[in-house]
Image: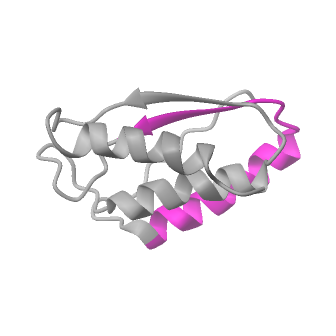
Amino acid sequence: MSHIQKPLDAYSGDFDLELAVGEFNQLATDFGATMIFIAAGADGHISDPLSTLNYSVDGIVSAGQAIKAHFPKTPFLIGGAGGYQPDTHTPEIWSKMVFGLATLEN
């Protein structure tokens, strides 16, 4: 198994995202992941006009940090993905995700 996709229910919030990250961490550990790729999608943000998800900026960043904390020595590749607010929340989420992972204490 090289990838897993787990859609979350409409109106899922930060708590649901946190649970999904916990499941991901366990699956990636069981798989023996040697690299983690995060598609830092901003389209789950609560104010995204095309989404039914309810994540906060802090919730999205916290999700990335939880993965990095679980895999402190594993190489990460982060790419911006999704988000339909190019002048507001999308670049904010992408930049805070990268900064949050880069400055996380191991």
Residue at (52, 61) in percent of width and height: 62
Image coordinates of residue 50 in percent, x first then y, are 15, 43
The reply, left or right, for residue 105 in relation to residue 56 is: right
- Give the overall secondary structure of the magenta segment: helix
Quarter location, residue 102: top right
The reply, left or right, for residue 85 in relation to residue 64 is: left
The reply, left or right, for residue 39 in relation to residue 13 is: right
The reply, left or right, for residue 101 in relation to residue 54 is: right
Number of disc labels:
0
Q: Nearer the viewer, residue 78 or 44?
A: 78
Magenta span covers which residues?
15-41
Instruction: From this view, report whether residue 55 is shown above or below residue 80.
Output: below
Q: Among all residues in the image, which is located at the extreme bottom?
A: 15
Image coordinates of residue 13 in percent, x first then y, are 36, 67
- Quarter holding the N terminus is top right
Quarter location, residue 46: bottom left
Q: How is the image coloured?
A: one colour
Image coordinates of residue 67 in percent, x first then y, are 66, 52
Is residue 58 among the parts visible in the rendering? yes
Image coordinates of residue 63 in percent, x first then y, are 54, 57
Residue 17 part of the magenta segment? yes
Q: Which of 39 and 75 is in front in this view?
A: 75
Residue at (79, 48) in percent of width and height: 72
- Quarter holding the C terminus is bottom right
Residue at (17, 32) in percent of width and height: 86
Residue at (16, 55) in percent of width and height: 47
Instruction: From this view, report whether residue 67 is shown above or below residue 1.
Output: below
Is residue 24 among the parts visible in the rendering? no
Instruction: From this view, report whether residue 24 is shown above or below residue 83.
Output: below
